[in-house]
Image (cartoon, rainbow, N blue to C red):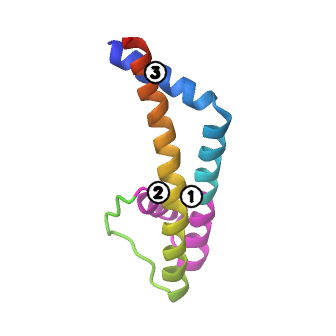
């Protein structure tokens, strides 16, 4: 149970940090921006647009959706380049806080 409490404490520490909040805000904004693009340009439903945006930025990439328009494909190239860096930075910052919290309790 100690590991779960370390994770919970690490998440609380991370989420209370202003830089983490900013990174998460930027990540959510990028996902919403991309979702709106896919909804209006590709004609996808909102849920499909959000799903594709999250799957793409997280590099999971199931391959069940892909842009059909040239504009959609070009946008996706830039979305991956920009979004991946922001997503990885946010995830790494949160993971660092969790690991730091865990190490702090073992000393």
For label 2, the SS is: helix
Marks 2/1: CA–CA distance: 7 Å
Question: Farthest bottom residue?
Answer: 70
- Chief secondary structure of the magenta span? helix
- From the top left corner, tell me how far across and down residue 88 is, in percent: 47, 51
Relative depth, front residue between 54 and 43: 54
Q: Residue at image x 63%, y 28%?
A: 16
- From the top left corner, tell me how far across and down residue 72 is, in percent: 52, 80
Residues at circles 3 and 2 in contact by the CB criterion of under 8 Å:
no
Residues at circles 2 and 1 in contact by the CB criterion of under 8 Å:
yes
Residue 106 in sight from this viewpoint: yes
Give the label, 3 or 2, closer to the camera. Answer: 3
Q: Which residue is mark 2?
A: 54
First in sequence, mark 2 or 1: give its number: 1
What range of the chain is rendered magenta?
A: 32-58
Q: Residue at image x 56%, y 58%?
A: 31
- From the top left corner, tell me how far across and down residue 104 is, in percent: 44, 16
Q: Left or right: 91 with respect to 40? A: left
Q: Which residue is mark 3?
A: 101
Residue 43 in sight from this viewpoint: no
Residue 95 is covered by the magenta coloring: no
Up the image or down, 28 lies above or below 4; here it is below
Q: Residue at image x 41%, y 59%?
A: 55
Marks 3/1: CA–CA distance: 29 Å
Relative depth, front residue between 64 and 18: 18
The numbered dot on residue 31 is 1
For label 1, the SS is: helix
């Amino acid at each position: 149970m100690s590991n779960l409490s370390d994770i919970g404490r690490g998440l609380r520490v991370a989420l209370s940090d202003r830089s983490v909040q900013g990174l998460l805000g930027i990540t959510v904004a990028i996902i919403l921006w991309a979702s709106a693009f896919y909804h209006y340009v590709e004609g996808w439903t909102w849920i499909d647009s959000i799903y594709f945006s999250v799957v793409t930025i997280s590099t999971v990439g199931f391959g069940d959706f892909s842009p059909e328009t040239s504009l959609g494909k070009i946008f996706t190239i830039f979305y991956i380049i920009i979004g991946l860096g922001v997503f990885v930075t946010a995830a790494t910052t949160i993971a660092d806080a969790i690991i730091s919290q865990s190490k702090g309790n073992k000393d």
